Image (tube, rainbow, N blue to C red):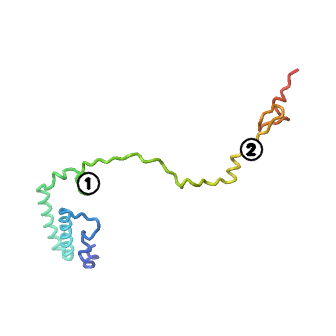
Amino acid sequence: MARWRHDVLPRSVISIDAHYGVDHSATTVMQNGLLEMFNQCVDRLSGSPEMLCAFSEQFQGMKDEVMGKGVGDAEHDGANEHVITNLLRVPEETEGSCSNPQGIRNKGCGTNRRLVGPGKKAANRKKKTPRQCKTCFEFVTDHDSRNCPSKNKDPAP
């Protein structure tokens, strides 16, 4: 990656400070400065494998020295919370609350209704209209005076 961006853009554009939303606290500025110095050294030494190897050994020695001292171990002893706190910039003790959502709102504005087609209307209508049977005088759809059940009831002789 370094050879593609080598001397193409000025360092001020590549710098982390040129990005939006960067934290400008003293610790973050120091961390960003250290990362920039390391990247500059690696970019400068990328053409010479011997010097890059020597730089790697020096950096490994510094890393072993820092890790051997136990600097910052109280904060990092298996504590993912500390890492998340630094990342989000939110104190650990904050307690969130969540409420149930409001009711479901269906699509549409509610002023217009769906148009019902003639086929759907015909299916909703009854097949026959009720008519009055002249024998039993009831409004029915299943018989008339010709086949009325009360007419067919003849007394047995």
Q: Nearer the viewer, residue 50 or 12?
A: 12
Is the residue marked by circle 1 packed among few (<14), some (14-19), or many (20+) residues within 10 Å?
few
The correct choice, above or below, for 118 with respect to 51 in the image is above
Residue at 52% across / 54% down in the picture?
107
Residue at 82% across / 29% down in the picture?
150
Residue 111, given in percent of the width and then of the height, sits at: 57, 54
Of label 2 and label 1, which has the lower sequence position? Answer: 1
Quickly name the residue at label 1: 90
- In this view, which residue lies farthest toward the bottom? 7
Pick the quarter of the image with the N terminus: bottom left
Between the residue at mark 2 and the residue at mark 1, the CA separation in whole angstroms equals 70 Å
The correct choice, above or below, for 146 with respect to 13 in the image is above
Quickly name the residue at label 2: 127
Amino acid type, label 2: Lys
At mark 1, the secondary structure is: loop
Pick the quarter of the image with the C terminus: top right
Question: Quick check: marks 2 and 1 in contact, CB under 8 Å?
Answer: no
Amino acid type, label 1: Val
Q: Nearer the viewer, residue 31 or 63?
A: 31
Residue at 18% across / 67% down in the picture?
34
